[in-house]
Amino acid sequence: MSGYVIVELDVTDREGFAEYAKLVPSIIEAFGGKYLVRGGKHETIEGDWNPKRVVVLEFESVERAKEMFASKEYAPIAAIRHRTAKSNVIIVEGA
C-alpha cells in the first residue's frame, strides 16, 4: 500500500532553502519516492487552512517513507530545511 507524505512549508530563508530544494530530490528518488505536488498554486475551498507551500510525495509504502525521513543520508538535508523553513509533515497510508 502506498505511503503519501504531505508537507506544509513556510520558507523563511529563500536562499538557504534553495540548497535544500536542490539536494532533496535525489534522496527522495533513492528511497523510491516521487513528487506528486511541489509547491504549485493552491486554493482553500473549505475551512481556514491557508498554507504558504504544499508538497506531496508518493512512496511504495509508509514504511519506505519513514525510512527516508529517518535515514542518515537525509539527516543533513533535513537540517537545512529545519533551518530555512517552518514545516508540518504527515505520512498517510494510501487506499
Image (cartoon, rainbow, N blue to C red):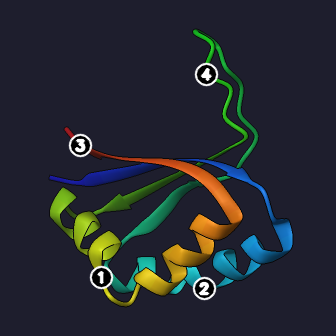
Say what amino acid the circle numbered 3 marks: Gly
The disc label shown at residue 94, or none: 3
Residue at 71% from the left image edge and 25% from the top image edge: 43
Residue at 34% from the left image edge and 51% from the top image edge: 4
Q: Earlier in the sequence, mark 4 or mark 1?
A: 4
Question: Helix, strand, or loop for circle 4?
Answer: loop
Q: Is residue 38 left or right of residue 13?
A: left
Q: Residue 7, percent across and down? A: 51, 49
Q: CA distance from mark 3 to mark 2?
A: 26 Å
Question: Helix, strand, or loop for circle 3?
Answer: loop
Say what amino acid the circle numbered 4 marks: Trp
Of tags 3 and 2, which is closer to the observer? 2
The disc label shown at residue 71, or none: 1
Q: Is residue 19 above or below residue 95?
A: below
Q: Earlier in the sequence, mark 3 or mark 2?
A: 2
Say what amino acid the circle numbered 2 marks: Leu
Asked whether the beta carbons under mark 4 and mark 1 sit within 8 Å of each other, the answer is no
Q: Which residue is mark 2?
A: 23
Q: Is residue 73 above or below residue 43?
A: below
Q: Residue 74, percent across and down? A: 42, 82
Q: Earlier in the sequence, mark 2 or mark 1?
A: 2
Q: Which residue is mark 4?
A: 49
Q: CA distance from mark 2 to mark 1?
A: 15 Å
Of tags 4 and 3, which is closer to the observer? 4
**Quarter of the C terminus within the rendering:** top left
